Image (cartoon, grey):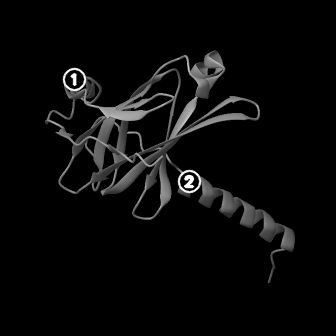
Amino acid sequence: MKFISPNQIRILSCILMTLWVVGCSSLDHTARNGAIPKGESIVFGNISLGSKTSSWASDVSKWFLADKIITVLCLNNGQPILEHTFSGNGGPFYWALPPGKYLVLDLTSHVNVGVTKYRQIRASFTITLEQPVIYLGTIIITPSNISVTDDFDSAVHAFHNKFPAHNGEPEKQLMTIDKRQ
C-alpha cells in the first residue's frame, strides 16, 4: 500500500484551494444575448461620471484614463456579487442577476501605484421573479452629488440593438439613492 507524502498533500491542497477560489469568486454577471438564464433577470442602465474638473479627481487625465470598478452587493447575504469595470467617463451596463435586493455600493479607481480614488454610491434596486428585463436608470456621479436619471427610450433602443433576441419591453424600475452618504 502506497501512502501520499506530506508534500504531495500540500501540493494537492493548494491545487484544490486554487480551483475552489477561482470557481467561487467569479463576479462576472455580464448579460449575454440569447435566452435569459433560468432564475435570472437582465438589469441594465448607464454609468456617467459628471464633471471632468473636480476636487475629488485632482489628476483628471489619470482618473478618466484609469479603469474604474463599480461594486454591487447582494443585500440578501451582504456579499459582493458583481464588479463592473469600465474606462473613460462611463457607459452602459448589462447584468444577469437572480431575484434579490441589491446595492450599487461604490466606485473605485487605481489612478497610480498606491493612489486609489473612492466614491460611495449606495443606489439600491430589487429584482423579483416576474421581471425578466429591468431598466435601472443612469447613475450620474459628480463630486458633490450622485443621482439617477431616466433615459428609458434611448437605453431601451441600445438594449434591443445589443440583445436582438429579447424583443419584449423592459420594465422601468429606477434605482433609489441613499442620501445618508
Q: Can residue 66 be spotted in the picture?
A: no
Q: Residue at x 85, y 68 (%)?
A: 7
Instruction: Give amino acid for label 1.
Output: His
Q: Nearer the viewer, mark 1 or mark 2?
A: 1
Q: Can residue 181 be spotted in the picture?
A: yes
**Which corner quadrant of the image does residue 133 belong to?**
top left
As drawn, the label of residue 168 is none
Helix, strand or loop at label 2? It is loop
Q: Position of residue 135 (x, y in %)?
A: 25, 37
Q: Position of residue 122 (x, y in %)?
A: 44, 46
Which residue has dot 1 on it? 157
At label 1, counting other C-alpha atoms closer than 10 Å, the crowd grade (few under 14, some 14-19, many 20 or more) is few
Q: Is residue 170 left or right of residue 146?
A: left
Helix, strand or loop at label 1? It is helix
Q: Nearer the viewer, residue 61 or 77?
A: 61
Q: Is residue 37 left or right of residue 50?
A: left
At label 2, counting other C-alpha atoms closer than 10 Å, the crowd grade (few under 14, some 14-19, many 20 or more) is few
Alpha carbon distance from label 1 to label 2 = 33 Å
Q: Residue at x 47, y 61 (%)?
A: 78
Q: Position of residue 69 (x, y in %)?
A: 54, 37
Residues tagged 1 and 2 counted as in contact (Cβ below 8 A):
no
**Which corner quadrant of the image does residue 151 belong to?**
top left
Locate the N terminus and report the quarter of the image it occupies: bottom right
Q: Residue at x 38, y 53 (%)?
A: 102
Q: Is residue 56 left or right of residue 100?
A: right
Judged from this view, the residue extending furthest toward the left is 168
Q: Can you say whether 181 is above or below 65 in the image?
A: below
Instruction: Give amino acid for label 2.
Output: Ser
Q: Can you say whether 39 is above or below 57 in the image?
A: below
Which residue has dot 2 on it? 25
Of the numbered discs 1 and 2, the one sitting upstream in the chain is 2
Q: Nearer the viewer, residue 155 or 63?
A: 63
